[in-house]
């Protein structure tokens, strides 16, 4: 018989940015083909109901949240309000990419830029809930875990679809990889030197 002791989470909060590999319901209310809130999706998820996850059960970030000690999966930004946001939010969106235009052919999605803007909204809400100033809020957030998994749609739903996107005509595969890195808001400030060596 296995026994275990559940303690407090190893981090106070967990924020998730990504695409369909991590989306847990943010696309449910969007006008998009990239939506999976219907059977048979979710048949192996607790309760056997579709949640908007692009799989039959839990995602990798759900499992990671369990390992970190969270009692429930991190909730989606689209439908979560109140004090629950203090433990983190999931901003991931199916069909989303680093480039804003990626995925537009399937309809609505939340690009990485928009996910980061949603996180800015969350930060203000957390500061209000915790009644902290900017410095105290940042000290709290610095203890949190951030997961970013993004980029495959920039190839599947962009670069490899020349009938809809010009990227494969404008860039070699190596150039496009550099463009994605430098287009990524997380790395943008460190990429100025890359642009000196590619023909934009």
Image (tube, rainbow, N blue to C red):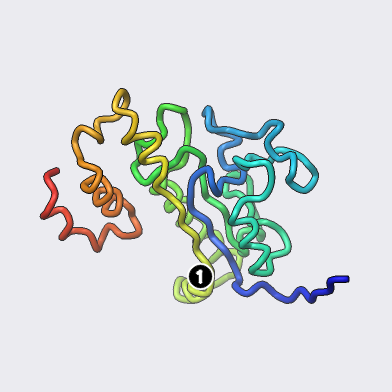
Q: Position of residue 150 (x, y in %)?
A: 43, 50
Image height of 47 relative to 62, above or below: above
Image height of 6 relative to 160, above or below: below
Q: Position of residue 53 (x, y in %)?
A: 62, 42
Image height of 197 relative to 103, above or below: below
Decide which of 51, 86 is in the foreground and name it: 51
Q: Relative to 36, is 142 on the left or the right?
A: left
| Residue occupying the point 57% across, 42% down | 26
| Residue occupying the point 63% across, 74% down | 10
Q: Relative to 89, is 99 on the left or the right?
A: left
Q: Quadrant of residue 100?
A: top left
> Which residue, given by chain and number where applicable, does mark 1 sit on?
141
Q: Position of residue 102 (x, y in %)?
A: 37, 37
Q: Quadrant of residue 164?
A: top left
| Residue occupying the point 49% across, 76% down | 139
Q: Quadrant of the C terminus?
A: top left
SS class, disc 1: helix
Decide which of 12, 149 is in the foreground and name it: 149
Q: Quadrant of the N terminus?
A: bottom right
């Amino acid at each position: 018989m296995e026994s275990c002791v559940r303690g407090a989470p190893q981090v106070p909060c967990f924020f998730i940015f990504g695409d369909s590999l991590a989306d847990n319901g943010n696309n449910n209310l969007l006008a998009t083909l990239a939506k999976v809130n219907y059977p048979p999706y979710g048949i192996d998820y607790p309760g056997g109901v579709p949640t908007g996850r692009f799989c039959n059960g839990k995602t990798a970030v759900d499992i990671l949240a369990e390992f970190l000690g969270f009692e429930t999966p991190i909730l989606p930004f689209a439908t979560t309000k109140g004090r629950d946001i203090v433990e983190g939010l999931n901003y991931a969106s199916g069909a989303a990419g680093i480039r804003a235009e990626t995925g537009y052919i399937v309809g609505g999605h939340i690009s990485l830029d928009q996910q980061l803007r949603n996180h800015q909204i969350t930060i203000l809400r957390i500061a209000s809930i915790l009644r902290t100033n900017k410095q105290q809020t940042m000290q709290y957030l610095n203890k949190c875990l951030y997961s970013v998994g993004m980029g495959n749609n920039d190839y599947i739903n962009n670069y490899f679809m020349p009938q809809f996107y010009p990227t494969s005509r404008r860039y070699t595969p190596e150039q496009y990889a550099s463009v994605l890195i430098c287009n990524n808001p997380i790395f943008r400030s460190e990429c100025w030197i890359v642009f000196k060596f590619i023909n934009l």
